[in-house]
Image (tube, grey):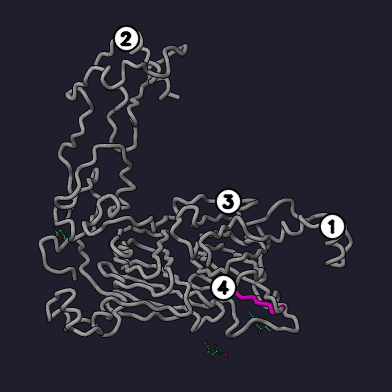
Amino acid sequence: MHHLVHVIVSLAIVHRHSVVLALPTPQIGDYGENSGPVGGVKPPMPTVTAASGSLRGDSSLLGGNAPLPDPGKSDPAVVPNPELVNGQEAGANLGLYLDFDSANPPQPIRGTEGSTDPGPRTFDYEKLNPDLFTPPGTDGGSVPSLMWPMGLSHNRPGTGTNSGWARQQNTDVLPAAKAMAGVDMRLAPNSYRELHWHTASEWALMLKGCTRVAAVDDEGRSFIDDVCAGDVWFFPAGVPHSIQAFGEGAEFLLVFDDGGFSEDGTFLVSEMFQRNPLEVLSKDLRADVSAFDDLPKGQLYIFNGTPAPEDVQQQNTTSSAGALTGNNSFTYHWSLQQPFTTPGGSVKILDPQTFPVAKMFSTALITIQPGAMREMHWHTTSDEWSFFLQGSGRITVYVAPAASRTFDYTAGGVGYVPAGSSHYIENTGDEDLIVLEVLQAPKFSDISVAQWLALTPKQVIKDHLHLPDSVIDALPKEKPIIVPGNKNLTALAGGGRAF
Ligand SMILES: *[C@@H]1O[C@H](CO)[C@@H](O)[C@H](O)[C@H]1NC(C)=O
Ligand SMILES: *[C@@H]1O[C@H](CO)[C@@H](O)[C@H](O)[C@H]1NC(C)=O
Ligand SMILES: *[C@@H]1O[C@H](CO)[C@@H](O)[C@H](O)[C@H]1NC(C)=O
């Protein structure tokens, strides 16, 4: 409203004088960061008791009619004393990671590329996304967004009292992520995600706390188990399941094999019962109609429950078809798997080789030390959906034939890389980076760039890339998976090497 008042007052002046004087540029203000004056509105606003003036200017303001402006009186586009951070003066193609945390404000400059930014902005976005604000000189062409922070997702609260919430990433917010979608869900102590099913398959990683999960498959085989932080469950499409948190509550990450999946679009036991004739319910469940007097009104979604008995056997019921055990188990106690360690970090793989029910979910949990990098690679047939559990990192996605873009990620962020597109994950922070990679493939695998070059005839590599013999001879014949590096990401500004 203040905006409008200001405009009205300004235009009233224009109207009265009819000849347009060089007004003190009222529409463009002293805006820097998005705090205080924005878009030319500088509080305090004049007090007006009755509206006056007109909402629009007249034809005297059209170019050619209006007097030429006096640039000396315009809000200057000059940024005095721009502050550059370490590495910013280095050549743009070096593409050093720029830590803008200390810059007030950051400027989008790399070597001789870019220029200062005098305009409207919110510094926090630029500090979180330095490679979008100030791309490496090697980025080019058009690449759709491949990054979505869950912190920008709408959060849907559960029903009942502080029962939990869920927020999601799907093609509504990240249109390029066609093959997979993700949900971050919180259940308060003893809360449920209500009995439900969906047309996508669901793979889940427990992030915090413990839950009891239960399901029944189409052959009447039942399943129940308790899982805690670091463990995984999988429910095939259409299989109804329940999830209940234990006394300390839980948070978990769900990944679906459909980019358009919505947590708001699942089949719910509450709705199914409310949306069928009571006569049918009576016949189907062999019950008096009055048995359905207390059905819930509306969806339960996420809601408070009574504590589950500690002993899982009290809730373990089977038919003649038996329980889903062994290779049919819907859970994998991944927290108990020891990681494969390698210089620069560690890796745990969980794919159908050891967790067969999750037929197409091939996943890796990767820890990358400061300065280290998940090596340059691509996946042959599957897109990659990734989730950052800790720390910060960046990824450059090379897209055929001639485009690439670099994105920055922090804990709670989703990344996406289309099949065949080369990428790396570089730890850009000072703590371990932990990231989950999820593929839709029968086996977790990748093409390692370094190994590919090592196993290709030397002459072929030389003729293509003109690399020195010493580099080609030292290429690793085994996949490094992770490569260590200098913790100081700007150390090679003066030349040399990054490790
Ligand atoms: C549930 O009972 C079945 C046997 O009926 C058993 O195979 C299965 O391991 C039990 N589940 C748990 C979590 O103990
Ligand atoms: C379970 O599956 C794995 C790999 O799919 C297989 O090697 C193993 O023999 C199976 N175990 C049983 C008991 O069927
Ligand atoms: C990183 O290296 C640069 C260039 O040598 C140096 O100026 C900077 O102080 C170093 N940063 C840290 C944190 O050591």
Query: Which residue range is magenta in the image?
Result: 220-225
Q: Which residue is mark 1?
A: 278
Dot 2 lies on which element? loop
Q: Quick one: quadrant of the C terminus?
A: bottom left
Q: Give me the disc on residue 234.
A: 4
- Which label's residue is closer to the chain start, 3 or 1? 3
Label 2: how many Cα within 10 Å (few below 14, some 14–19, many 20+): few
**Mark 1 / mark 2, whichever is N-terminal:** 2
Residue position marked by numbered label 3 in the rendering:
157
Nearest to the observer: residue 496 or residue 294 = 496
Q: Residues within 10 Å of mark 3 (few under 14, many from 20)?
A: some
> Is the C-beta separation of discs 3 and 1 under 8 Å?
no
**Disc 2 residue type (three-letter):** Ser
Q: Please identify, in this view, whether the residue under mark 1 or under mark 2 is nearer the observer.
A: 2
Q: Earlier in the sequence, mark 2 or mark 3?
A: 2
* Whether residue 389 is situated above or below residue 159 in the rendered picture: below
Which of label 2 and label 4 is nearer to you? 2
Quarter of the image where ligand 2 sits: bottom right
Q: Is mark 1 within 8 Å of ligand 1?
A: no
Q: Earlier in the sequence, mark 3 or mark 4?
A: 3
Q: Decide: marks 1, 2 in contact (CB < 8 A)?
A: no
Whole-number angstrom distance, CA of label 2 to CA of label 3: 56 Å
From mark 3 to mark 4, how far is it between C-alphas? 24 Å
Q: Nearer the viewer, residue 372 or 419?
A: 419
Q: Nearer the viewer, mark 3 or mark 1?
A: 1
Q: Residue 483 got which mark?
A: none
Which circle marks residue 18 in the picture?
2
Check residue 22 for magenta coloring.
no
